[in-house]
Image (cartoon, rainbow, N blue to C red):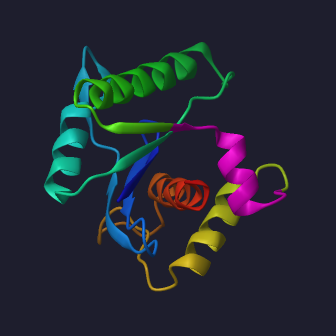
């Protein structure tokens, strides 16, 4: 199994089969509040991975080198560090993935500010019957789950 992780508070996780790329399970990034700020819940991520009960490679998107604000950079760095630390302490196989690498391979040349549109289009092409919403109450596809799926597929193609 390959678990793709879109690293961010509004990110997602998607487990796919190494053999045929079919989706095993998907999840919006679990978070909790600490001192008035949201953080990724690395324990919930670990429990989700364990519940899938199969050997896995964790493909996690590395944070960008820049962001809109220092607060966004801080948040991405903390999220990435927490997930990497959880993986390392649990002896999970980790493959950090550069944003531009997976996007170039999976989406091709994308006009500025169109990444999410192209990602949804590619995800629908690869898994046409999949419901990309976070849950049944949601009305729009969840960008984090879609990106996690594409990160997992990218990793499958490059293993």
Residue furthest out toward the bottom: 129
Residue 59 % position (x, y): 46, 45
- Give 69 or 115, whichever is nearer the viewer: 115
| Rendered residue at 21%/40% (across/down) | 46
119 on left or right of 132:
right
Q: Position of residue 114 (x, y in %)?
A: 75, 57
Q: Quadrant of residue 84?
A: top left
Q: Residue at x 83, y 49 (%)?
A: 112
Answer yes or no: is residue 159 visible.
Answer: yes
Question: Would you place residue 108 above or below residue 94 in this image?
Answer: below
Q: Is 61 in the magenta?
A: no
Q: Which residues are magenta?
A: 96-110
Front-most of 81 and 93? 93
Looking at the magenta stretch, what is its main secondary structure? helix
Residue 102 lies, in percent from the top left, at 66, 50
In this rendering, does residue 114 appear at all? no
Q: Quadrant of residue 139?
A: bottom left
Q: Residue 91 is drawn in which quadrant?
A: top left
Residue at 35% over, 30% down: 83
Q: Dividing the image into 4 quarters, which one contains the C terminus?
A: bottom right
- Relative side of 50 to 7, left or right: left
Q: Is residue 85 left or right of residue 132?
A: left
Where is 27 relative to 29, above or below? Answer: below
What is the count of numbered marks? 0
The quarter in which the N terminus is drawn is bottom left
Magenta-colored stretch includes residue 98: yes
Residue drawn at (24%, 26%) of the image: 33
């Amino acid at each position: 199994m390959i678990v793709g992780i879109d690293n961010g508070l509004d990110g997602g996780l998607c487990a796919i089969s190494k053999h045929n790329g079919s989706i095993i399970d998907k999840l919006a990034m679990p978070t909790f509040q600490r001192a008035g700020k949201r953080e990724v819940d690395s324990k919930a991520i670990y429990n989700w991975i364990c519940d899938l009960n199969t050997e896995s490679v964790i493909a996690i998107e590395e944070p960008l080198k820049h962001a809109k604000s220092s607060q966004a950079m801080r948040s991405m760095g903390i999220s990435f560090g927490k997930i990497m630390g959880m993986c390392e302490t649990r002896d999970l196989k980790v493959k950090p993935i550069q944003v531009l690498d997976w996007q170039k391979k999976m989406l091709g040349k994308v006009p500025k500010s169109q990444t999410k549109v192209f990602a949804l289009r590619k995800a629908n092409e690869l898994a046409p019957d999949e419901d990309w919403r976070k849950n049944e109450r949601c009305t729009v596809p969840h960008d984090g789950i879609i990106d996690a799926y594409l990160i997992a597929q990218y990793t499958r193609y490059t293993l």
